[in-house]
Image: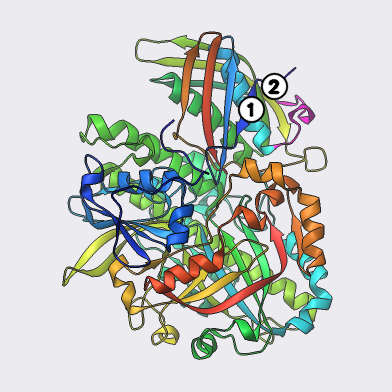
Amino acid sequence: MTPTYRYLEEIATADIAFEAWGATREETFLAAADATLNTMVEDIGTIAPLERRLFSLAADSLELLLFELLQELVYHKDADRLLLRVRDLRIEETGSGYRLHADAIGETIDRARHPLLADVKAVTLHRLSVEKTPSGWRAVVVLDV
Amino acid sequence: MDAGGGCAVPVPVDIVRLSDTVWEIPVSHKAGMLVPARVFATEKLLSEFDDGVFEQITNVATLPGIVGHAFCMPDGHWGYGFPIGGLAAMDPGHGVISPGGIGFDINCGMRLCLTNLTYGEVQPRLRTLVDRLAGRVPAGVGVEGTVRASRDDFREAVEQGARWAVKRGYGWQEDLERTEEGGCLAGADASRVSEKAIDRGYRQIGTLGSGNHYLEIQVARAENVFDPDTARAFGIVLPDQVVVMFHCGSRGFGHQVATDYLRVFLAAMRGKYGIHVPDRELACAPFLSPEGQDYFAAMKCAVNMSFANRQVILHRIREVFSEVFGKDPTELGMRQVYDVSHNTAKIERHVFEGKPRELLVHRKGATRAFGPGMPGLPDVYRETGQPVILGGSMETGSYLLAGVDTGAGAFFTTAHGSGRAMSRTAARKRYRGRQLQEQMEERGIYVRTASWSGLAEEAGPAYKNVDDVVEATERAGLSRRVVRLLPMGNVKG
């Protein structure tokens, strides 16, 4: 599958910025999750589906919902040393904002099989955006590495 | 797009030149500025700043309770909320505290350790040393440290800092007095920290991290000693003496504390406190509010985690040198010179407008640089001023500086590094990690890395010229040069 994200060099001097896109909000969120993972691991195809975590997250805007999703990936990387790919992601609107449910499947970091890149410290709010475009949705994220 | 980074832009037209290294942007520059913004830079560095610096430092000047000026150091570049190199002192009574003024990597800092070995003695064993250091000080994504600590042990560690580590045999008592704040910031309260932060941190004591974090064996060449008397006081006494410098922070624990409170402040700021800031990354709360005090107590835990982390790493460095040279670390003269923080907010006493005043000093990518005789300095450095450790790129070199009396004008603060000039993504496109390693080896620098692309991102040209930055701090009266240190071997995170 062609990645639906690209890294941006013109912003975030000391860190990593990317844009991700998709036909739906869900596809865009999945692309952003892969882009975050790809900041840490050179080939995300090397991550075997061995362990599963369920994400159930809420936020009052789509941007902050994306922030929460990506932050979960950063959290599990340190807390359980897990590299997780997100799938089966659903976004619902609630009275006060949005809710997200997703499966995250992956495995423990294995340096022999997962060539590692940068350690993501945090997802930032800088330039964080999720917006509708004529062809679908687009997100911009800056990660602190 | 608004505030960006990476490309040099014309400096603001209304910037005023106060001297050849001090520039001021008046309050009329932007609606909401409460104080002027002051930038320390030579004309050359000023012209090389990215547009983020001017945008962000003038945003900082709008924060409630800011005192004097919003400052930017000569190594300034685009950051989140504050620029890297940002300094702001707030009135603790009516001012705010902002995680954006501290950074995600709370108490990221530098530590420098001496040896009584010379270049000639270390060079033949350089590879062994670097390889063993890389094994003993884990670096890179998702690594665990070499200290076994339960979650409860970890809670103690983050309240006690480097003292916790020394109590457990990781280091010497004298290391503590040679660490900013004695290696423990008082008032840290682990009950203000989330379980998630504990989850991320409790297995990471003794790890280096990645990005621009590194551990480096360096040499002090005789021709690079600018002030022999101060160098002697700092322990640099031999020609071609070898030292070890490292740069790291509070790891996942500090990052989670910062993230948790960014969320809290974002929610409380507008609704509860009616504060409006020009950038979400400047989310803040009144220092004396429950949110402000909770964050302050949690941030101090991250400060202490970082001190404990660097304390354990120092111990590992001593172990490796001791094994390789078959001597006790004391016989090898492995005393710590100092440990400085460059991402913190602290209550400090400063003289402002002729009167002593307590201030909440935010330093983000900026180093405290106390002048001679100031309280808080250990006796050994009372006459010299505080040692300041400034890390350059892995290819070009670093500096040991000293704090000066004239630093009072900027709350005794100086630069922290050479400052990035090229984005990581751009550097990765231009340089190749393996090739860079070979080129450095040809120049006698042996480097080990946890990530080839990470190595490429740290190539020398990705940074400003460290000599320019240091010269600017000296001419601006922020700190003075003592010794320039050249890289020999590097473990890159």
- The answer to whether residue B208 shows anywhere in this view is no
Q: Quadrant of residue A73?
A: top right
Query: Tag 2, which chain?
Result: A
Residue that badge 1 annotates: A6
Q: Position of residue B102 (x, y in %)?
A: 40, 51
Vertical arrangement, residue B412 with respect to residue B28, above or below = below
The residue range painted magenta reads: A41-52
Query: Pointer 2: residues within 10 angstroms few (<14), some, or many (20+)?
Result: few
* Distance CA(mark 1)–CA(mark 2): 8 Å
Which residue type does callout 2 highlight? Pro
What's the colour scheme?
A: rainbow
Q: Horizontal placement of B129 versus B390: left or right?
A: right
Q: Horizontal placement of B378 versus A2: left or right?
A: left
Q: Nearer the viewer, residue B57 or A40?
A: B57
Q: What's the residue at 67%, 73% (across, down)? A: B218
Asked whether disc 1 touches disc 2, contact meaning CB atoms under 8 Å apart, the reply is yes
Does mark 2 fall on the same chain as mark 1? yes
Q: Position of residue A133 (x, y in %)?
A: 50, 12
Residue that badge 2 annotates: A3
Vertical arrangement, residue B246 with respect to residue B3, above or below = below
Query: Tag 1, which chain?
Result: A
Q: Secondary structure at mark 2?
A: loop
Magenta stretch encompasses residue A44:
yes
